[in-house]
Image (tube, helix red, strand yellow):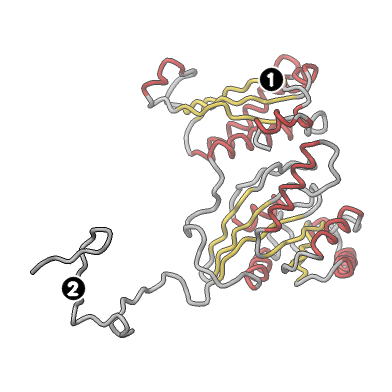
């Protein structure tokens, strides 16, 4: 029998008389590994600086994926955390604090927040229980009013106020906007976290899981390492220069890699992590280093503890302090730093 070909030279296979493609009974059946009513989607955690977004993200995920600090404007990039449940999957997006920018960096962080809002399914607007509703909250409420997406107002840090004050704040928040729900939580004590998960899930669209169910974040390893160093620096330096400090992971080297054998420092089979702490002026280098190197040593000790816990192995951490002049307002410097 002569083989027939189509115009592109591919063979035309004869019809199988035993196969009826229009017969649904003969079509292959794909059995999904998730319930038919499964929901999944992206949830943006939004709020002014220092409203507890990162602490809440960690509490919802059940492990630390975002750095936290008492310093405002700690978060400088979106951090995604994955919460997988039997009936749903929430992909949390912890955003930088929305504020009136004083630098080009601040403007770009606000732009990042606005871009994020456009691509999520639900918004969790975080407002601390102990803070009076202010201009920043009203600014955000106006931004959210025209988005046409469900917004859950989350009253955070409820462990810091009395019940009467919490009731007053819940009333004030209800008057701030037209919210899909209002949920009070304490991320620090784990109170109402399960309730918030249920409420956020109720607003997600029907969808299969978006990430593997064993995932907790899609943050690159180097980014998480750099953030742990910055967290340690923020806590050590307190109010001295938190906004002027940036961190860059120069390299992570495994001693088992032969071509790097000549560059290994320290002893043992420790992972080599080299990090630069960037400041805006030479005078700030002395602050980061501290008298006799005390600050830099303390930052390294604390950061190394977190990095070893993250990576599950011993680490040799090599820190250097460098000057990148006025980087917060320099477009080229911000581009180099990924902003």
Quadrant in the rendering for residue 4 = bottom left
Rendering quarter of residue 76: top right
Disc nearest the viewer among 2 and 1: 2
In percent of the image, x 48 and y 77: which residue is there? 36
Which of the two residues, 203 or 225, is positioned nearer the viewer here? 203
> On the image, numbered disc 2 is attached to which residue?
14
Residue shown at 56% from the left, 66% from the top: 40
Name above or below for residue 102 compared with residue 260.
below
Above or below: residue 110 compared with residue 250:
below
Secondary element at tag 2: loop
Q: Nearer the viewer, residue 18 or 162?
A: 18
Taking 62 as reference, is 94 left or right?
right
- Residue on which the image places disc 1: 322
Pointer 2 local density, CA inside 10 Å: few below 14, some 14–19, many at least 20: few
Q: Are marks 2 and 1 in contact (CB under 8 Å)?
A: no
Depth check: 69 or 202 in front?
A: 202
Q: At numbered mark 1, what does the secondary structure look like: helix, strand or loop?
A: strand
Q: Quadrant of residue 237?
A: top right
Residue 15: x percent and y percent? 20, 76
Real-space CA distance between mark 2 and mark 1, rounded to the nearest whole angstrom: 71 Å
Q: Residue furthest front?
A: 7
Tell me where residue 229 appears, x and y as whole percent: 64, 32
- Residue 170: image location, x then y, percent: 85, 67
Q: Whole-percent x and y of residue 8?
A: 27, 58
- Quarter of the rendering occupied by the N terminus: bottom left
Name which residue lies at 76% across and 29% down. Answer: 330
Which of the two discs, 2 and 1, labels the residue nearer the N terminus?
A: 2
Q: In the displayed structure, does residue 90 sit left or right of residue 262? A: right
Within 10 Å of disc 1 (Cα), the crowding (few <14, some 14-19, many 20+) is some
300 with respect to 4 (left or right) = right
* Mark drawn on residue 235: none
């Amino acid at each position: 029998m002569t083989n027939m070909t189509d115009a592109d030279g591919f063979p035309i296979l004869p019809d199988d008389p035993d196969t009826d493609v229009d017969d649904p009974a003969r079509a292959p059946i794909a059995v999904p590994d998730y319930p038919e009513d499964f929901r999944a989607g992206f949830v943006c955690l939004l709020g002014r600086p220092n409203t507890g977004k990162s602490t809440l993200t960690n509490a919802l995920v059940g492990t630390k994926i975002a750095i936290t600090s008492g310093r405002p404007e700690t978060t400088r990039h979106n951090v995604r955390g994955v919460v997988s449940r039997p009936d749903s999957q929430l992909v949390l997006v912890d955003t930088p604090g929305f504020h009136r920018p004083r630098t080009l960096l601040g403007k770009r962080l606000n732009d990042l927040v606005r871009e994020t809002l456009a691509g999520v399914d639900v918004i969790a607007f975080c407002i601390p229980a102990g803070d009076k509703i202010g201009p920043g909250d009203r600014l955000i409420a106006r931004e959210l009013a025209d988005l046409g997406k469900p917004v859950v107002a989350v009253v955070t840090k409820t462990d810091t106020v009395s019940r009467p004050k919490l009731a007053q704040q819940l009333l004030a928040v209800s008057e701030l906007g037209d919210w899909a729900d209002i949920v009070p939580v304490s991320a620090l004590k784990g109170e109402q976290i399960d309730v918030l998960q249920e409420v956020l899930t109720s607003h997600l669209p029907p969808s299969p899981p978006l990430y593997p169910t064993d995932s907790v974040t899609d943050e690159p390893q180097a980014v998480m390492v750099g953030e742990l160093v910055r967290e340690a620096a923020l806590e050590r330096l307190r109010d001295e220069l938190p906004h002027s400090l940036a961190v860059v992971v120069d390299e992570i080297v495994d001693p088992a890699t032969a071509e790097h054998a000549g560059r290994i420092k320290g002893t043992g089979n420790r992972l080599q992590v080299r990090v630069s702490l960037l400041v805006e002026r030479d005078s700030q280098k002395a602050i980061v280093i501290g008298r006799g190197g005390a600050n830099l040593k303390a930052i390294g000790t604390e950061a190394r503890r977190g990095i070893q816990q993250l990576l599950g192995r011993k680490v040799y951490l090599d820190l250097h302090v460098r000057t990148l002049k006025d980087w917060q307002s320099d477009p080229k410097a911000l581009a180099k730093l990924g902003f």
